[in-house]
C-alpha cells in the first residue's frame, strides 16, 4: 500500500511532456441548486469550466449539457443543450446553469453529470454528483401479483403566475408494471401540456423484457463499445435480441434508432443546429466457454435537414453558416478473460465523416482502444490506451476526440470494510499528425480519493486532483488546476447530516489569463420527529475570485422543507422554500440578482388508492443592478391514483 502511494505521488512530480492539448477544458465546479429539491420543482445544475487549450471557442461552437441518473446510476433523461453566451479565449472561464424539472413522483437520491463540449466533442465532464429529491405525499399501492397490472397515474396542474393565463402547465405521469404473455413490462411516462404544446413527452421509457430479448422505447442510453456508441442518451428505440436456439444461443444482437440532438433555430449572430438522428446495429458471440467474446457494429448518423429551414424569414431558420453533417462508423470488439480476475479488451473502429451532406467529401479515420482490468477482493486495477486519428469522428461516442492519444490508469484499494482508496492517472496527447499550425501540448490529470466509514455511522471522504496543460513551446500554453474536496456524512436513528467543502485553483503560469480560486461549501440536515414530522435543510455557497483584478463571482442557495401529518393516514401537509442569490462585481460580467420561492400544499388521502393535493406558491425576484423587482403568486394541484 505504501509503495503504491509513493508511486502515485511520485508521478505528480514528473514534469509534463511536450505532447498534448490543442483543445481541452477543466471543470472547476459542478453543483445542484437547490439541494435538496422538492419533487415537482426545478433544479439548476451549475458549473464553471476553464478553457485550458490554445484555441478560442466561438459561442456557437461550444455548449453545456447535463444527464440525470437514478440511485443506481441508470440514465433517466438529459437537459436541453445550453450554448455558450460569449466567445471564450484560452484561460477564460464560462459558467452554466441548466434547468431540470423534477417529476412529481420522484423521491430519494439521484445523480447528475455535467458536460462541456466543443465542436461536438465532450472535453470535460463532472463525476456523478448526488442530489436529493424530497418526495411529496403520493399514495403508493402494494406491488401487484405477477400476472396482474399495477401502477399509478398522476394528473397535475401548476400555474406559477395567476396573472399570466399562458403560464399554466398541466402534466400527466403514468407508471405501469406488469406481466404480459411470457415477459414483463414497464412504462414510465411524464408528459407536459402547456400553451406551447398540447402534448410534450418530457420523460418517456417503455420496456418489455423476455428471455428472448428486450425492447426499450423512449429515453434510452445504449452501450455498444467505447468507440462507436456509448454515453449518448437519445429518444428512440432499442432492441436487444437473445436467440434461444442451440446454434445461436451464444450470440446477441442489438438494434438502435433515435434522435440524439433536437433542432434549434438560429439566434442573434449564432447558427442553429439540426436535429441529429442515429441508427445502429451490433452483433456479438462468445467462444471458449465464454472466455472469448467478439462483436461487430455499424453506426449511421446524420443531421435531419428537414428540421430547419434555409429561409432567413422562417422561424426555424438554420443560420447562414450551418452545414448538415453525416457520419458512418464500423467497429470491431474483442474481449478475453483468461482467468476470473483478469479482463482484456480490444476495440477498433473506422469512421467516415462528411462535413457537408449537400456537397459530400467524406474523410476517413480510425480509432483503437486497448484495456486491461484486474480485480481481487481488496484491489482493482484498470489500464486503458486509446488512440483516435486526426479525421476520426463518431456521433455515437461524443467523448472521443480526434487527433488524440490517451493513457489511463485507475486503481482502488479496500484494505478493510471501513476504508477505501481510489486513484486515477491519465495523460492525453493531441496533434498526432504534427500539424505545424497547431499547438502541440500535454494534459495530465491525477486524482486521489480516500474514504473511511467509522463505527459511529460517520462517513469521511477526501479528494485531491490536479489537471496540468503545457504547450510546446510552453509560452503558448502552460496552466494548472488543483482541486481539494472533503466530505462528511453522519446518520443516527433516522437523522442525517452531510457537509462538503471544495476548493479549486486555476493558475496560468504564462500570466496570459487570469488566475481563479473557487470555494464551495454545502451542508444539508435531515431530521425526523415523533414519526409525524420531517425537516430537511440545505445550504450551498460558492465563491470564485479572480486573483489578478480581484473581482468575485458568488452564488448562494438555502432550501428548507417540512413535512407533517395533520390527521394520521388522512391529511398531511408540506411547507418548503428556497432562496438563491448571485453576485458578480466584474466590469464585464456584473450582476446582482436574488430570488425567493415559498410553497405550501396539503394532501387528502381519500381512499387507500386515491389522493388529492392542493397548494399555493409565492415567488419574488430582484435585480439590484437593473433596479427591477417582480412578485408572482401561483397555485398547483394534482390527483394521484394507484391500481
Image: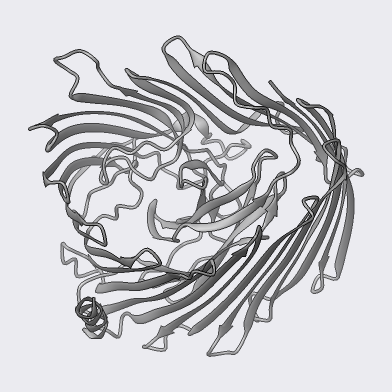
Image: 425 above or below 329: below
**How far across and how far down the image is residue 175, in percent?**
61, 27
**How far across and how far down the image is residue 639, in percent?**
80, 29
The residue sitting at 45% across, 61% down in the picture is 126
**How far across and how far down the image is residue 499, in percent?**
59, 71
- Res 199 seen here: no
The C terminus sits in image quarter: top right
| Left or right of residue 194, residue 442 in this image | left
Q: Quadrant of residue 8?
A: bottom left
Nearest the camera: 1 or 546? 1
Image: 75 above or below 502: above
The residue sitting at 60% across, 26% down in the picture is 143
| Left or right of residue 86, residue 474 in this image | left
Image: 233 above or below 467: above
| Left or right of residue 94, residue 605 in this image | right
The N terminus sits in image quarter: bottom left
Amino acid at each position: 500500500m505504501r509503495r503504491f502511494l509513493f508511486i502515485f505521488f511520485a508521478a505528480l512530480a514528473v514534469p509534463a511532456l511536450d505532447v498534448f492539448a490543442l483543445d481541452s477544458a477543466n471543470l472547476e465546479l459542478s453543483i445542484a441548486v437547490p439541494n435538496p429539491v422538492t419533487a415537482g420543482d426545478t433544479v439548476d445544475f451549475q458549473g464553471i469550466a476553464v478553457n485550458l487549450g490554445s484555441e478560442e471557442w466561438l459561442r456557437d461552437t461550444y455548449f453545456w449539457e447535463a444527464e440525470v441518473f437514478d440511485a443506481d446510476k441508470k440514465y433517466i433523461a438529459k437537459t436541453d443543450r445550453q450554448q455558450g453566451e460569449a466567445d471564450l479565449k484560452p484561460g477564460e472561464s464560462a459558467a452554466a446553469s441548466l434547468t431540470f424539472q423534477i417529476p412529481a413522483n420522484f423521491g430519494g437520491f439521484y445523480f447528475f453529470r455535467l458536460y462541456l463540449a466543443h465542436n461536438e466533442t465532450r472535453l470535460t465532464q463532472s463525476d456523478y454528483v448526488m442530489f436529493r429529491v424530497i418526495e411529496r405525499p403520493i399514495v403508493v399501492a402494494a406491488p401487484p401479483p405477477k400476472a396482474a397490472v399495477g401502477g399509478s397515474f398522476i394528473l397535475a396542474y401548476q400555474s406559477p403566475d395567476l396573472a399570466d393565463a399562458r403560464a399554466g402547465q398541466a402534466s400527466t405521469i403514468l407508471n405501469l408494471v406488469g406481466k404480459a404473455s411470457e415477459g414483463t413490462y414497464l412504462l414510465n411516462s411524464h408528459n407536459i401540456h402547456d400553451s406551447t404544446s398540447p402534448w410534450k413527452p418530457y420523460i418517456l421509457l417503455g420496456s418489455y423484457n423476455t428471455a428472448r430479448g428486450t425492447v426499450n422505447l423512449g429515453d434510452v442510453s445504449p452501450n455498444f463499445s467505447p468507440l462507436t456508441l456509448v454515453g449518448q442518451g437519445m429518444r428512440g428505440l432499442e432492441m436487444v435480441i437473445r436467440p434461444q436456439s442451440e446454434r445461436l444461443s451464444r450470440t446477441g444482437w442489438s438494434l438502435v434508432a433515435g434522435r440524439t440532438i433536437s433542432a434549434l433555430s438560429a439566434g442573434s449572430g449564432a447558427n442553429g443546429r439540426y436535429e441529429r438522428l442515429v441508427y445502429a446495429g451490433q452483433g456479438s458471440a462468445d467462444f471458449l466457454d465464454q472466455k472469448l467474446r467478439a462483436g461487430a457494429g455499424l453506426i449511421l448518423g446524420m443531421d435531419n435537414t428537414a428540421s430547419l429551414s434555409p429561409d432567413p424569414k422562417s422561424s426555424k431558420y438554420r443560420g447562414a453558416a450551418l452545414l448538415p453533417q453525416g457520419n458512418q462508423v464500423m467497429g470491431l470488439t474483442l474481449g478475453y478473460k483468461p482467468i476470473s480476475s483478469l479482463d482484456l479488451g480490444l476495440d477498433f473502429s473506422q469512421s467516415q465523416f462528411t462535413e457537408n451532406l449537400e456537397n459530400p467529401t467524406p474523410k476517413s479515420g480510425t480509432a483503437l482502444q486497448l484495456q486491461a482490468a484486474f480485480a481481487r477482493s481488496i484491489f482493482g486495477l484498470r489500464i486503458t490506451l486509446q488512440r483516435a486519428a486526426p479525421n476520426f469522428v463518431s456521433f455515437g461516442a461524443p467523448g472521443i476526440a480526434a487527433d488524440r492519444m490517451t493513457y489511463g490508469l485507475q486503481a482502488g484499494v479496500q484494505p478493510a470494510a471501513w476504508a477505501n482508496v481510489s486513484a486515477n492517472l491519465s495523460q492525453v496527447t493531441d496533434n498526432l499528425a504534427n500539424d505545424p499550425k497547431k499547438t502541440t501540448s500535454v494534459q495530465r490529470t491525477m486524482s486521489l480519493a480516500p474514504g473511511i466509514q467509522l463505527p459511529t455511522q460517520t462517513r469521511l471522504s477526501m479528494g485531491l486532483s490536479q489537471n496540468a496543460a503545457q504547450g510546446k513551446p510552453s509560452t503558448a500554453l502552460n496552466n494548472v488546476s488543483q482541486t481539494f474536496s472533503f466530505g462528511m456524512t453522519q446518520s443516527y436513528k433516522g437523522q442525517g447530516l452531510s457537509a462538503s467543502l471544495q476548493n479549486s485553483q486555476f493558475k496560468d503560469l504564462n500570466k496570459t489569463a487570469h488566475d481563479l480560486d473557487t470555494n464551495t461549501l454545502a451542508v444539508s440536515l435531515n431530521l425526523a420527529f415523533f414519526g409525524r414530522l420531517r425537516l430537511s435543510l440545505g445550504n450551498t455557497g460558492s465563491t470564485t475570485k479572480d486573483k489578478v483584478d480581484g473581482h468575485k463571482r458568488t452564488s448562494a442557495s438555502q432550501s428548507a422543507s417540512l413535512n407533517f401529518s395533520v390527521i394520521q393516514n388522512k391529511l398531511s401537509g408540506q411547507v418548503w422554500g428556497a432562496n438563491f442569490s448571485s453576485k458578480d462585481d466584474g466590469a464585464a460580467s456584473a450582476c446582482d440578482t436574488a430570488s425567493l420561492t415559498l410553497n405550501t400544499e396539503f394532501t387528502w388521502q381519500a381512499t387507500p388508492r386515491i389522493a388529492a393535493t392542493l397548494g399555493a406558491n409565492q415567488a419574488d425576484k430582484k435585480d439590484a443592478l437593473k433596479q427591477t423587482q417582480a412578485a408572482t403568486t401561483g397555485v398547483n394541484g394534482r390527483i394521484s391514483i394507484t391500481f
